[in-house]
Image: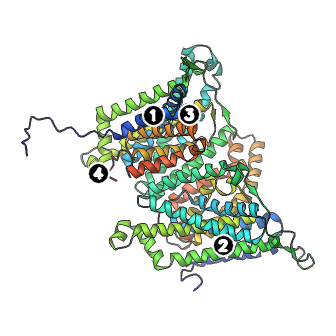
Amino acid sequence: MMILSGDPPRSRALSILLAVIILALLATPFIFPGAKALNVAAKICIFAALVASYDLLLGYTGSVSFAHTMFYGIGSYAIAIALYGLGPNWTSVAVAVAAGLPLALLLALAIGLFSLRVEAIFFAMITLAIASAFLVLASQLSWLTGGEDGRSFQLPELLRPGTVFISKDWFGFPINGRILTYYLVLSACALMILALLRVVNSPFGRVLQAIRENRFRAEALGYRTVFHLTYANCIAAVIAACAGMLNALWLRYAGPDTSLAFSIMLDILLMVVIGGMGTIYGAIIGAAIFILAQNYLQALMSIASTAAADAGLPLLPGLLHPDRWLLWLGLLFIASVYFFPTGVVGRLRNKPGANR
Amino acid sequence: MSEIAATDALPKPKRDIAPLLLPVVLALVMIPLIGSASSWVTLTVASLAMGMMIFIMASGLTLVFGLMDVLNFGHGAFIAVGAYVATLVLLPLASWAQADSLMTNLAVLTSAALLSMGVTAALGLVVERVLVLPVYGQHLKQILMTTGGLIVAEQTLYALFGPQIIPLPLPTAFRGSFIIGDVAISKYRLLAMLVGFAIFVAIELVLTRTKIGLLIRAGVENREMVEALGYRIRRLFLGVFMTGSALAGLGGVMWGLYREQVHASLGDELTVLVFIVVIIGGLGSITGCFIGAILVAMVANYGGFLVPKLALVSNILLMVAVLMWRPRGLYAVTSR
């Protein structure tokens, strides 16, 4: 209970689902051997933390930010630039953390003070504009960021796949630096999610929810809403930057397509809404469903598409083409905003209509 | 205190002309900085043409927001759909478009524009009924729903037309430029300026001289009062939404021809620009939107010429500067 900050899943089905996901993530290197499964699992961890930090903004304060990938990108690029420029050692990682997190924090502070005074709608538009400017900036300053190609780099010795700790005889596959990196990612993400649970269940988190429900009233009660919203924005930004750093460490690469693209922002939105806004747990469920779909639904769609093409049906092969999987997720997204706005978590907690 | 007789004319509201002068002053300041007169004219014409096209796309968005407090994040989808529909007319009729006759060229262009506007207006009807109406009055859900609509529209375009870039050559009559002295003015830019200005004048006339315009302006200012007087503002809103969508479609056609290529990412790309324009202009204000569009285009063109690196963030800097001066945009017409 303590570790969950007194906010348990509150539903048997949800607890079981979460336990299955977490156990599967913990055991992935042992039960699903192979690079693809490990990649999918690491991506689920990273996105669960990233989406949870976005949930702090969207679900708990009700402000829609389109600049979340910008902070994610700042983290990714900080690691990439430091390890590329200063060489693959732990000092560079420390430099990246010491430079990247304050940068994300300052930027979030500036955006918050500048635009959180106004309505949600204004904030959404301004963050969209700033994020797109940042994306252009990152792809144009190629001397620093590697432009469209991004930056590939080497990891510190300890985390490299070549570093073998336990040889192949024990488990039938070697325990190497790659698996260590995976557990590093997993534990860091778990820590961040638990920290977010702590934040939203603190008195501060309650004020955020009060602001979401009725900003005017919260202000009338004497809370400085701009201060609270900006603070939440900064926390979310720092966590997003941390998730970005883990992402870069895992991929050994940072580029516009993997960290800054607008499509990632849309993915995050989809995950939050499908999982359930304002629950934090929704982030884990949403990320797991979405990324599994992204990686395995496409194979199914490819089969369906070929079948439709063989049957000579018009249009369907194009609509079912594996590259069009986002179309179906988009439809699912609209349907879920419309029919079950509380997402999977809200459904499982069995309180349809409750605005949480 | 002087007495006011009943026969006296109502006092004229004070006209706020400072924002109107802004683009003029900006253009004049640029003359010494750019140096050569011919490049200045070229750049100014380019920015006016670009500004007009952006205005066409943004005008619908600003009215929809002003009237009904609905922010359509899927507005970019109408732009992209408009451009794609135009390829359906312009590519099969390529022989007409490439014919050496102004009349056939114009006919083909007009039919493409009309078809695009028709399709986007119909799409606007569907979007308003299906996506916007159910979540009316809830900002958060509106943003989410319309963003979902954007994803679906973009993916459907990819599925129907394929992911490749479709080239869209300009009709013969609008290629090349008029050359006056040592100044070259592209014909298509001139056309874009004319169309954009005509649309601005038309919208202004409808808003200030007709009953529907009066209702729209009254609705922007105070929706409940208009409803209380017995007007069905929902229907009015549907009309504005469809018109706005059609204008976005027209803007998409013009932008596609301007770039001479069409791609589904067009929508995303322009959404940001259109949003900046709407914020700068003041949500709900057509005049503000017009000036905002010209300002954005001017900053992009002049900035790109003088300090190319700055052009990347020039829009944001412009937005920050305008909001520092007037926090609610150039013209704040809504009470929200």
Q: Note whether B200 is above or below A288 in the view shown.
A: above
Q: Is residue A177 left or right of residue B127?
A: right
Q: Earlier in the sequence, mark 4 or mark 3?
A: 4
Q: Residue B255: which disc? A: 3
- The answer for which chain carries disc 2 is A
Q: Residues within 10 Å of mark 1 (few under 14, many from 20)?
A: some
Question: Residue at the spot x=56%, y=57% of the render?
Answer: A67
Q: Residues within 10 Å of mark 2 (few under 14, many from 20)?
A: many
Colouring chosen for the image of the structure: rainbow
Residue type of the residue flagged with mark 3: Trp
Question: Residue at the spot x=31%, y=49% of the render?
Answer: B223
Q: Residues within 10 Å of mark 3 (few under 14, many from 20)?
A: many
Q: Residue A189: which disc? A: 2
Q: Which residue is mark 1?
A: B27
Question: Residue at the spot x=54%, y=56% of the render?
Answer: A66
Q: CA distance from mark 3 to mark 2?
A: 44 Å
Is residue A276 at least partly visible in the picture? no
Q: CA distance from mark 1 to mark 4?
A: 42 Å
Q: Quadrant of residue B252?
A: top right
Residue B202's spot in the image, x, y percent?
A: 38, 30
Residue type of the residue flagged with mark 1: Ala
Residue B45's spot in the image, x, y percent?
A: 50, 28
Pointers 1 and 2 in contact (CB under 8 A)? no
Residue type of the residue flagged with mark 2: Cys
Q: Secondary structure at mark 2?
A: helix
Are the residues flagged by discs 4 and 2 from a single subunit? no
Residue A33's spot in the image, x, y percent?
A: 83, 69
Q: Nearer the viewer, residue A168 or A95?
A: A95
